Image (spheres, coloured by chain):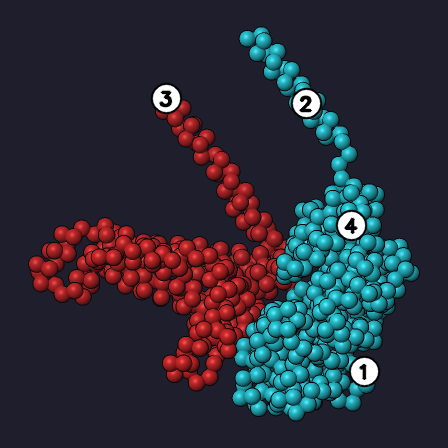
């Protein structure tokens, strides 16, 4: 009887959070899912049930596949940088030397800078004629002609990936650093006794023991980057042309620029299903299991 | 204990009584409106007008709320669904049309006729709101694009301070300036991104060649030889724009003109304030939009900023009266000058004959310094300035609001200047996109 009372109390404490989650998350998800089966405009007074027509329209149109391709390009490009660089930074920050705590604090700076401020600054910094990046590169002889990095279809996406990855670095670095610091030093001492070099210690001790954290950071980075909208919209708005128009940008344009709510909802549902299936396969079959 | 209970009862009763008395006092009527001019000095100009109005009408509490232009369509539609629209809103014709389509607007023909009789509204400004024998908006102030230029750059690289009179001359000047300056100064400033700025600049070319989005019955005529000519001219000219112009948004042309990296731009002549206050320079001018080849008619874009009033406001007689009184107040020439030359000289112009002749308008020191620009602007407004989809003095296609909201014209231009499509392909593509939104009147 006493135990049951405690259980009821626990559920009561959870209730407010559950209600908030239902209102903020569940309700919009369900509405979006329903809208995806309707021909409905933003602010429109009429809506017609059209079944899967929104989905078949998307799947048969090149702009959708182009945006999906750009989403994958964007995500994988970010993923590579956001796994490799944080790992290297974490190893460096794991050292025990003077000033290391200051270094660990400074590495947080990109994370705490507001995305809007970063995006606006970067836009101006990469402009030709008046942006500092062109000035620096030109003055040291790296470029003979100034480039609008974010306005050129060849450079816009790679530059955006670099800038976005810079923002994510602290998060991945701190997670991997925490995992590194959890590895007992005795393991490294044993490896040293066995004559392992620095690289061999990394290859046979550090990397395998960090495995689960790296896989976890990898999936987080994949999902977050796939869903990135704010940074792209604030810098290029999906341009030049459609060069950086990923699926989240396409959703925004479809819903809030062309007011086609049904279509935008269908794209959202597609992304949700895609990420759920990917997550299932990732954690079921790809992530190494702990023995 | 009894004394405590008695004390609490007496205190609560007093509080209740005072509260009821306060609540029953006559409160000023709250009226809220939205506008979309976010810069601090523009908000201040609106507030000045509001304060003057409230001084004469202490029973009205008027409040402005700023909604960024980029959010205006979405927030207005969302507010309509949530029943949180303001009492009235400043808008542009496309937004008014979008709200008309959403069945949110009330006709204000009586108010328009009253103001027209008193102050003579410029016909092409007024007629953009005429539909089904009613007026759905009243233009308070307007904007117009002219051929703005820096006379000193024309003198240095072209050998004259006279502005180009034809688009061929514009191309020639732009080439000479860009090449002659070693790309230190670029000849022309036009954008190529998918945004309203490109929509507006591109329309100058569309209007100059005599192309139209629709015919008089509202049928699409966008994919035409004239549109293709306009796109080709735009594409030829943008080659002499600064690198990155294909991605420009609002503010970048003003920045480049002021920074001395641009010689000419078909744009709002609104950088006067900077030249007057920061640079103390006369090196900024504006001319009529050039002619296209053998045409004897010019074309440029005008964007009236009107107010429209919502049905829900009209259902409350005191709210309707308050809004009408405020509109009458704003249209007084002396007050209107605060919203035009007072708010942004060269950015906003009057929409009535009376306001265009007001001493308060022309006495503005910036207007005095750049008087010729304002004279050219008034001529353009009265003679040839128009707006895509509104060229016929009435609404011909209700879908123009959504076409603008989707930036179809800008998208079409973007496809050409980024090399994705030829002008012919882009014109055909643009018309296909417009078909999704097109609603000819009478259908």
Q: Which quadrant would the N terminus of chain B be assigned to in this image? A: top right
Tag 4 residue: B53
State if disc 3 and disc 1 touch (CB < 8 Å).
no
Q: Position of residue B102 (x, y in %)?
A: 74, 55
B326 or A183, which is in the foreground? B326
Answer left or right for A239 relative to A45: left
Residue B16 circle label:
2
Q: Position of residue A206 (x, y in %)?
A: 21, 58
Q: Earlier in the sequence, mark 2 or mark 1?
A: 2
Element marked by disc 3: helix
Q: CA distance from mark 4 to mark 1?
A: 42 Å
Would you identify the image quadrant in which residue A144 lies? bottom left
Q: CA distance from mark 2 to mark 3?
A: 46 Å
Q: For mark 2, does the 10 Å Cα neighbourhood hold few (<14), some (14 to 19), or many (20 or more) residues?
A: few
Answer left or right for A187 relative to A127: left
Tag 1 residue: B297
Answer left or right for A206 relative to A33: left
Image height check: is A30 above or below B187? Answer: above
Residue ID at (67%, 64%) = B405
Q: Chain of mark 2?
A: B
Residue ID at (49%, 35%) = A16
B361 or A94, which is in the foreground? B361
Residue ID at (45%, 68%) = A160
Q: Position of residue B218 (x, y in %)?
A: 80, 70
Which hue is chain A drawn in? red
Residue ID at (11%, 56%) = A190
């Amino acid at each position: 009887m006493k135990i049951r009372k405690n259980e009821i109390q626990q559920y009561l404490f959870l209730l407010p959070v559950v209600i908030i989650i239902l209102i903020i998350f569940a309700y919009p998800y369900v509405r979006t899912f329903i809208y995806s089966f309707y021909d409905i405009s933003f602010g429109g007074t009429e809506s017609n049930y059209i079944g899967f027509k929104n989905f078949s329209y998307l799947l048969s149109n090149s702009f959708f596949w182009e945006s999906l391709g750009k989403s994958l390009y964007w995500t994988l490009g970010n993923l590579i940088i956001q796994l490799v660089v944080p790992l290297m930074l974490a190893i460096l920050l794991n050292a025990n030397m003077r000033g290391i705590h200051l270094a660990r604090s400074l590495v947080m700076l990109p994370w705490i800078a507001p995305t809007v401020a970063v995006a606006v600054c970067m836009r101006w910094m990469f402009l030709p004629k008046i942006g500092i990046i062109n000035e620096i590169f030109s003055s040291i002889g790296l470029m003979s002609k100034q480039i609008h990095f974010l306005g050129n279809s060849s450079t816009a996406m790679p530059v955006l990936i670099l800038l976005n990855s810079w923002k994510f670095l602290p998060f991945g670095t701190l997670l991997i650093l925490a995992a590194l610091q959890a590895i007992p030093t005795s393991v490294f001492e044993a490896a040293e006794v066995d004559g392992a070099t620095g690289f061999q210690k990394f290859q046979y001790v550090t990397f395998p023991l960090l495995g689960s954290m790296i896989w976890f950071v990898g999936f987080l980075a994949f999902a977050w980057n796939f869903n990135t909208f704010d940074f792209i919209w604030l810098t290029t708005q999906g341009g030049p042309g459609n060069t950086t128009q990923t699926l989240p940008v396409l959703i925004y344009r479809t819903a809030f620029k062309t007011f086609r709510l049904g279509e935008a909802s269908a794209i959202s549902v597609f992304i949700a299903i895609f990420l759920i299936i990917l997550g299932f396969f990732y954690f079921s079959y790809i992530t190494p299991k702990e023995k | 204990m009894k004394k405590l209970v008695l004390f609490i009862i007496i205190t609560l009763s007093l509080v209740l009584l005072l509260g009821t008395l306060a609540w029953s006092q006559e409160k000023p009527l709250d009226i809220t409106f939205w506008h979309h001019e976010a810069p601090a000095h523009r908000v201040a100009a609106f507030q000045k007008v509001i304060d003057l109005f409230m001084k004469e009408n202490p029973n009205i509490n008027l409040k402005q709320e700023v909604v960024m232009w980029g959010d205006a369509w979405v927030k207005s539609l969302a507010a309509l669904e949530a029943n949180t629209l303001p009492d009235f809103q400043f808008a542009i014709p496309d937004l008014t049309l979008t709200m008309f389509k959403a069945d949110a607007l009330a006709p204000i023909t009586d108010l328009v006729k009253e103001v027209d009789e008193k102050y003579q509204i410029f016909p092409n400004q007024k007629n953009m709101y005429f539909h089904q024998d009613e007026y759905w908006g009243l233009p308070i102030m307007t904007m117009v694009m002219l051929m703005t230029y820096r006379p000193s750059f024309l003198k240095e690289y072209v050998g004259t301070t006279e502005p180009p009179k034809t688009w061929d001359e514009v191309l020639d000047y732009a080439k000479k300036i860009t090449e002659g300056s070693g790309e230190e100064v670029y000849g022309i400033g036009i954008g190529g991104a998918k945004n309203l700025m490109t929509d507006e600049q591109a329309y100058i070319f569309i209007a100059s060649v005599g192309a139209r989005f629709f015919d008089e019955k509202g049928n699409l005529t966008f994919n035409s030889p004239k549109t293709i000519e306009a796109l080709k001219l735009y594409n030829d000219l943008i080659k002499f724009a600064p690198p990155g112009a294909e991605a420009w948004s609002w503010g970048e042309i003003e920045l480049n003109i002021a920074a001395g990296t641009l010689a000419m731009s078909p744009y709002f002549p609104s950088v006067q304030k900077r030249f007057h206050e920061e640079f103390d320079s006369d090196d900024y001018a504006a001319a009529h939009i050039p002619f296209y080849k053998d045409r004897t008619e010019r074309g440029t874009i005008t964007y009236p900023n009107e107010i429209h009033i919502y049905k829900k406001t009209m259902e409350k007689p005191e709210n309707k009266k308050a809004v009408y009184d405020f509109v009458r107040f704003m249209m007084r020439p002396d007050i209107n000058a605060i919203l035009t030359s007072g708010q942004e000289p060269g950015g906003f112009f009057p929409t009535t004959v009376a306001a265009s002749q007001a001493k308060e308008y022309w006495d503005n020191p910036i207007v005095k310094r750049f008087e010729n620009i304002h004279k050219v602007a008034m001529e353009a407004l009265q003679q040839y300035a128009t707006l895509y989809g509104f060229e016929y003095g009435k609404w011909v296609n209700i879908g123009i609001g959504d076409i603008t909201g989707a930036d179809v014209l800008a998208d079409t231009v973007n496809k050409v200047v980024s090399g994705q499509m030829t002008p012919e392909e882009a014109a055909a593509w643009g018309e296909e996109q417009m078909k999704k939104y097109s609603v000819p009147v009478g259908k």
